[in-house]
Image (cartoon, rainbow, N blue to C red):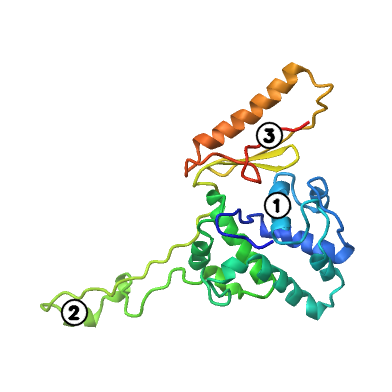
Amino acid sequence: MAVQKAARAPYASTGSIISVIEKHRQVGLQTMSLQRLPQIGVSEALAPRTMRTLAFLGFYDENGKVTPEFDSLRKAPDHDFKPRLAALLREAYAPILEVLDPATATPLEVENAFRGFEPTGQLPRMVQLFMGLMIYADIMPEDRRTAGVGVRQPGARTGAGATGKKGEAARGSRPHKPASETRHETPQPPGNSHGADFTQAGGNTFVLLMPSGPEMTLTVKMDVMRTSVEDRNFIFKIVDELREFADRHQASGAKSAGMDGQAAEVSP
């Protein structure tokens, strides 16, 4: 499933996705779920975003069943494994690769390419995941992670080393104006500084991403026929408070929504 503008882009940790890729290649993971991810080393806190990312990348469908394309990697010979994986990633990230060349792109250029995707507060993580997977699949060189950071234009003066005989010879003449320095921005560190985000990860699991970085996952297991009115009201109150917290801290002022853009609801 290729990411599309105004859609949600994946932002799981690169390590979590690579763990799934390598584990599937070793033993064949025909199904995937929030409960199974911790069994292969993905923490419960990262499981919801990891499941969403696996679906975005086209590795598993919405029901957690492996796709034929991803399953084929399990039997691919070593020399063909990375090229096949690269083909899957190129398809999933097609809109991004239309505007940049991963072989030469800088972190800032990748960040700009992801602007407009949701959730906006996870932009740094989107960049990290994209670059991490591109490097793992040999699409992007390793040195692209730091490309363009701290680069100065030729002739720029730095510190005391810029003074000396040439400087003394210029005394009495018009002061030398240092060459302008090109400033390069780098992606923000992981966090949700652009605001809070409240999503329904699937079923009755809800994830609240807070502005300063913490992530809260709430999973509701309820037999509606046996649950008392008081208990149901308490559960709904908690979900409402999480949603209201996200609404108050949304940088864009937009209403928080579930995975399909509708308000998240607890089902029986």
* Type of amino acid at the residue the image marks with label 1: Arg
Numbered circles on residues, count: 3
Which x, y percent locates residue 25? 84, 66
Which numbered disc flags the more N-terminal residue, 3 or 1?
A: 1
- Residue designated by label 2: 168
Q: Nearer the viewer, mark 2 or mark 1?
A: 1
Is residue 190 at least partly visible in the picture? no
Which x, y percent locates residue 159? 32, 69
Query: Which residue does the image show at 53% across and 49% down from the upper left?
Result: 121
Q: Nearer the viewer, mark 3 or mark 1?
A: 3
Taking the image as shown, residue 41 lies to the left or right of residue 127, namely right
In which image quadrant can residue 264 be found? Answer: top right
Taking the image as shown, residue 203 lies to the left or right of residue 194, namely right
Taking the image as shown, residue 24 lies to the left or right of residue 124, namely right
Label 2 and label 1: CA atoms lie apart by 63 Å
Mark 2: secondary structure: helix
